[in-house]
Amino acid sequence: QATMAEELRTVPVAGADGGLDAAAAIDRILAAITLTRRRVGPASGLIACVHDEDGVRRQRLLPLPVTTAGAALPPLTNEPPATVAAGVAEHFLFHQLLALLLRSIRVENRQRLMQMENALHHLEQGSDELARQRNRLRQEEIVEEIEVITGIRGGMH
């Protein structure tokens, strides 16, 4: 889920429902971010809420960190700097959101795998117990058959 401060409020945007939905979710999130930034201005920040190995946490995506070490010469581009910056920012957000979504999905899948392994272990224990009960009942049947056979033979003498 991504949120943007909008006049001291947040704008929730639904995240991905699963790994196959990640790209569509990112497109949905980027569209919501673009729409909101047009309303409140490009200086607004962006914080993503994500569930990963460290639990549920927030990660600031915008504004981008300002670096003090810069190149001596500005980059040479064929487009105006604002257009290039907007394109770079969109690609940056796309890849940051993709990384966050995939990390969250990985954690969710790991939790599901652990639950399935626990269920499998429980089923194996139940299967073992049923096998022991079956063997015990079969042994009781064999003992009864032996008693009947020996009783019949003992009664015949």
Image (cartoon, rainbow, N blue to C red):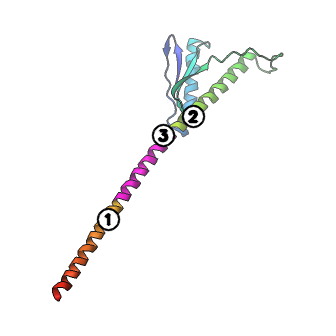
Q: Position of residue 50 (x, y in %)?
A: 53, 28
**Which residue position holds label 3?**
111
Residue type of the residue flagged with mark 1: Arg
Measure the alpha-carbon separation of dots 3 and 1. Answer: 34 Å
User: Which disc is residue 134 wearing?
Assistant: 1
Label 3, residues with CA under 10 Å away: few <14, some 14-19, many ≥20? few
Label 1, residues with CA under 10 Å away: few <14, some 14-19, many ≥20? few
Q: Which residues are magenta?
A: 110-129
**Quadrant of the rendering where the C terminus is positioned:** bottom left
Q: Position of 147 compared to 26: left or right?
A: left
Residue visible at 22% across and 77% down in the picture: 147
Measure the alpha-carbon separation of dots 2 and 1. Answer: 46 Å
Residue type of the residue flagged with mark 3: Gln
Q: Position of 19 compared to 69: left or right?
A: left
User: Which disc is residue 103 wearing?
Assistant: 2
Who is closer to the viewer here, 108 or 38?
A: 108
Who is closer to the viewer here, 83 or 126?
A: 126
